[in-house]
């Protein structure tokens, strides 16, 4: 029965029922930064703070399983020159949103790597470098909505042998959805973690399924990882 349950989880997570290599999974967190999460942040996204526990559970599961975690972040220069076109004017006019070096630009503590004390190296990130913040955990700056646009993400994932990415973060209509489509375009299998992405809605999830993405909640994700890696989900924080 355990073997049958594991096979079912593999099929649910990958869609084809074929062999699954647990080392080929990675977690992508999208824009889980103080300015977007905190209720008093200048760019707060409604509903994101309430989903932090689910995001943290997903990250803890990947860390415990020894699987890669990539945090994708934004860093808007004060003149707005590296912001999306629709936001340049407001930032240039004085809106300080995820400004490099600010507290608001940092990863929210709930999702930050264990041990604390990690601050973003904005100079390196803005130059396109990958910042390592844990044993198998990194941060990348993304200059537009999607995590793959003009970044090293695809190369970093392929160098690690990753074939499946799970996506959590903020906020679905913009960056997570774009990242899902970009991942699919690059032939990665995609898992959308529905209860760990803010502003998600049924039609969007249906459209993700239509391009082959799998939609799981955090509990199902942890069960799938447990089946693939042999790690007991109950051993993971919050599991």
Image (spheres, rainbow, N blue to C red):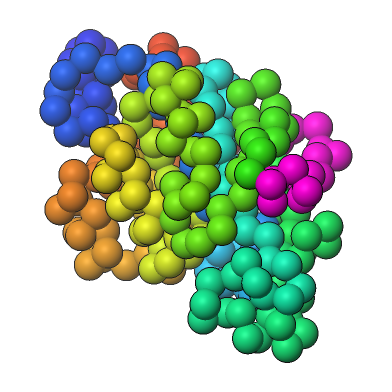
Q: Identify the residue shown where x is 80% and y is 40%.
A: 118
Residue at horizontal 34%, vertical 27%? Answer: 163
Where residue 35 appears, as percent x and y from the top left, is: 70, 67
Question: Is residue 10 magenta-colored?
Answer: no
Q: Is residue 195 left or right of residue 128?
A: left
Picture residue at 40% right of the left edge, 39% below the top: 166
- Residue 116 in sight from this viewpoint: yes
In-front residue for pair 19/91: 91
The picture places residue 7, in percent across and down from the top left corner, at 20, 19
Q: Position of residue 227 (x, y in %)?
A: 34, 19
Residue 50 drawn above or below residue 88: above
What residue is rendered at 51% in x and 23% in y?
Answer: 67
Q: Main secondary structure of the magenta part?
A: loop
**Is residue 145 positioned above or below 135 on the image?**
below
Image-based side of 205 in relation to 61, left or right: left
Using the rendered view, name the quadrant where residue 43 is placed.
bottom right
- Please state which of residues 85 and 54 is positioned toward the viewer in this rendering: 85
Whether residue 168 appears in this view of the structure is: no
Q: Is residue 7 left or right of residue 201?
A: left
Specify start and end residues of the magenta stretch as a single range: 113-127
Q: Is residue 71 above or below residue 5?
A: below
């Amino acid at each position: 029965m355990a073997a049958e349950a594991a096979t079912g989880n593999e099929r649910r997570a990958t869609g084809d029922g074929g062999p699954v290599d647990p080392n080929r999974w990675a977690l992508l967190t999208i824009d889980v930064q103080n300015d977007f999460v905190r209720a008093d942040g200048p760019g707060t996204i409604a509903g994101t703070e309430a989903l932090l526990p689910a995001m943290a559970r997903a990250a803890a599961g990947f860390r415990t399983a020894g699987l890669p975690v990539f945090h994708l972040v934004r860093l808007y220069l004060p003149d707005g020159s590296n912001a999306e076109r629709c936001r340049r004017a407001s930032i240039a006019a004085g809106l300080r949103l995820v400004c490099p070096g600010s507290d608001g630009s940092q990863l929210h503590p709930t999702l930050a790597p264990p041990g604390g004390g990690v601050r973003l190296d904005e100079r390196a990130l803005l130059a396109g470098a990958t910042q390592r913040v844990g044993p198998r955990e990194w941060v990348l700056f993304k200059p537009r909505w999607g995590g793959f646009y003009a970044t090293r993400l695809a190369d970093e994932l392929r160098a690690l042998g990753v074939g499946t990415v799970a996506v959590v973060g903020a906020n679905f209509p913009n960056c997570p959805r774009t990242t899902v489509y970009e991942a699919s375009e690059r032939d990665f299998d995609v898992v959308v973690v529905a209860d760990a992405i803010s502003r998600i809605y049924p039609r969007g999830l249906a459209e993700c399924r239509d391009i082959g993405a799998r939609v799981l909640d955090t509990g199902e994700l942890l069960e799938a990882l447990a089946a693939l890696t042999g790690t007991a989900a109950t051993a993971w924080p919050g599991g």
